[in-house]
Amino acid sequence: MLQIENVSVKVEGKDILKRVSLEIGEAEIHALFGPNASGKSTLAYTIAGFPNYQITEGGICFRGKDLGDLPIEERAKLGIALVFQHPPVIKGVKLSKLLERISKQRVDVSEFPMNPELLGREINNGFSGGERKLSEIIQVISLNPSFVIFDELDAGLDIENLEKLTSVIKDKLCNNGVSILLITHRGDILRFLEPHTAHVMLGGEIIGSSDDWRKTWDTIKEWGYEKCKECPLSPARL
Amino acid sequence: MRSVRSARYLQLDSEICQISSYEGVIIWPSRKAYDELEWTRDYFEQEPGEGYFIWVKQSIARPLTTRISICSPQVSQHPRNLVVIEENVEAEINGVCNATKRYLYGSHIGRSKIILKENSGLTMRHFHKWGKEDFVDFCIDFFMGKGARLSHTYKCLAVPKTLKMESNTFLESYSSANFEVVVLAKGGEVDMYDSTFLNGEKSNAITRIRMVSDKGSKIISHTKMVGNEAGTGHLDCMGILLGEDSSINAIPELINRNNGASLTHEASVGKISEENLNYLRSRGLTEDEAIDLIVAGFLGEEKPTIIKGRAVPSRLYM
């Protein structure tokens, strides 16, 4: 579904990603581990097509189509969706209004663990951490995507809320064959959404990938990310 | 006149086409008020030729509606309006001033005085929609008695070639005023002067201005809050620049002449943040659709106007 080949990315003149390669198949869940500022979010924004993220080499294909300079909204229309770590406040625009404008499929909010009043509030204005993530997930589901990037979904969420949200993700996305890239540096989400493959990013490079996410995560927990440099994981999917 | 369901004043060009009152509310042409009610002459600078006189003597459940429209080419309107809300009376007025076509080259020079007597309350919504080549100059003064309450919304989403507007508000003790001014300018020049005078202790006023300047437009917004007595006042001016050839000058001014008064302001003018645009585009909206949504949110959601028991968006009756 998604092929990233030797992609290097510059943001505001600074080289951030270095020859990153990654392939995600239909209905697969991949995890991308890495410490803060390792380039994980840069990869997410690059896939989504944000204008300031300039690909200097390599390319990204989605379902056989070269994304090239395709603008953000065209990528969204192809089925690429991003759950933001820090979504901005959109003053004066209610969540219900946004859903009205963007939805490709009807979303029954009664199926979500939320107070329906959230729909009548300004997007992300005064939302709690859980509400913000829930709003993101509802928006993304309404887009009927085929590939979703979750940027640090587990950041700022307690385990109880994380469990509720991952249950929605499984039900509405995973069970419908949607491919997923989970970006995380805490790993809390992994116990609820078990990835098929895990990748480790450090200094803007993917330094290893493995089909055994537990082994990868245990290594990171025990030795830290730096150890991954010395202990290359299985390059099975690269 | 008691049979009419909604009291209203309708003026097309210079002709009064409909005017109706009901129990407790008098709606007359201003000229008639000037002729028959001597006390109203204190409020008219000279004998009025056009405009309405509304005298609300008892509280009303439904809003009064007024409309003054330019319908023919090169019409020059000079409405002189006077609204009086009696003591302890509550009222609601929805007023529209507009041009029915985009190129009528009309002018509308209006002067309104709104008198709120002691402990009265008024909710007033004022909608303007003009043609590309019109000239509009209007001034509205509010005189607020002790304990009076005012909520005034002015919204103009289609500005004329030149729009000059002035508003002066004088608050006595314990009175409160809440102003919301919303202007979307596309290819016009807007000059706004808004002054509020806290003339009584514990008077309170908030002015909230939202302006968007696009397609070569120029907006100048002077807002002034004057603390003559121990009241509180706040100015909140925000602007978005859409076109590169557009400009906004926001000039808030606080004048405090009483050490018991508290005056504050906040102001910002800028373009739409890339972060917000990219966020909405990532949801599949084009850049233009994202801008429209952000601007609509910034200018505020329109509350529907109730006419004859039905919710009607202002754009439908303009």
Image (cartoon, coloured by chain):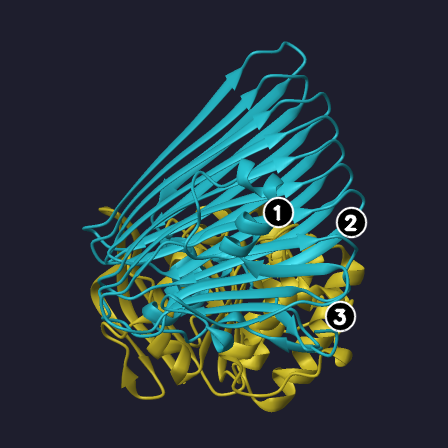
| B69 vs B202: above or below | below
Q: Which chain is yellow?
A: A
Q: Amino acid at mark 2?
A: Val
Q: Which residue is mark 1?
A: B37
The quadrant of the image that shows the C terminus of chain A is bottom left
Pointers 3 and 2 in contact (C-beta within 8 Å): no
Q: Residue A3 or B77: which is nearer the viewer?
A: B77
Label 2: which secondary element: loop
Q: Which residue is mark 3?
A: A116
Which residue is depicted at the point 63% across and 20% down?
B262
Spatial separation of the CA atoms under disc 3 and disc 1: 55 Å
Q: Amino acid at mark 1?
A: Leu
Query: Residue farthest to the top?
Result: B259
N-terminal-most mark, 2 or 1: 1
Which residue is depicted at the point 64% across and 64% down?
B64
The numbered mark 3 sits on a residue in which chain? Answer: A
Label 3: which secondary element: helix
| B112 vs B11: above or below | above
Pointers 2 and 1 in contact (C-beta within 8 Å): no
Q: Which residue is mark 2?
A: B89
> Mark 1 Cα within 10 Å, few/some/many (few <14, many 20+)?
few
Residue A17 in picture, x, y percent from top left: 32, 56
Residue B174 in picture, x, y percent from top left: 75, 29
The numbered mark 1 sits on a residue in which chain? Answer: B
Spatial separation of the CA atoms under disc 2 and disc 1: 20 Å
Q: Residue A227 or A61: which is nearer the viewer?
A: A61
Chain B display color: cyan
Pointers 3 and 1 in contact (C-beta within 8 Å): no
Which label lies toward us, 3 or 2?
2
